[in-house]
Amino acid sequence: MSIIAWIVLGLLAGAIAKAVYPGYQGGGILSTMILGIIGAFVGGSLFSLLRTGTLQITVAGAGLTLPGILVAVLDAIVAIYLWGLIGRSSNA
């Protein structure tokens, strides 16, 4: 999967995750894209692990398909949640 496809998938997954996730997350388009790419990367690797039984460090499992987008969005939501936890603990 090329870097352009990673960026497109990350932007799409991050935008959908921010729209679905309740509350205010802050951050702009760059943080949305980074969290989306992280979600696509982790989700693609886990999706490949569940499908094939081998861990492949790639987003190939979370390609620009409907299941791939769903996996990327779910993991982007997890990344937003974890980012919120880190942000709250550093402000306390």
Image (cartoon, rainbow, N blue to C red):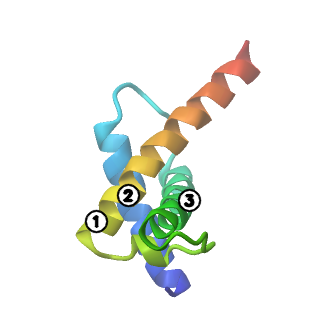
Q: Secondary structure at mark 1?
A: helix
Q: Outermost residue toward the front?
A: 53
Q: Residues within 10 Å of mark 1 (few under 14, many from 20)?
A: few
Where residue 35 sits in the image (x, y, percent)? 54, 52
Whether tag 1 and tag 3 are in contact, CB under 8 A, the answer is no
Where residue 19 sits in the image (x, y, percent)? 30, 42
Q: Nearer the viewer, residue 73 or 28?
A: 73
Q: Residues within 10 Å of mark 2 (few under 14, many from 20)?
A: many
Q: Is residue 10 visible?
A: yes
Q: Outermost residue toward the top?
A: 92
Q: Secondary structure at mark 3?
A: helix
Q: Which quarter of the figure is the C terminus placed in?
A: top right
Residue corresponding to mark 3: 42
Where residue 81 sits in the image (x, y, percent)? 51, 33
Amino acid found under the numbered disc labelled 2: Val
Amino acid found under the numbered disc labelled 1: Pro
Residue corresponding to mark 1: 67
Q: Secondary structure at mark 2?
A: helix
Residue 92 sits above or below residue 12 on the image = above
Residue 85 sits above or below residue 72 on the image = above
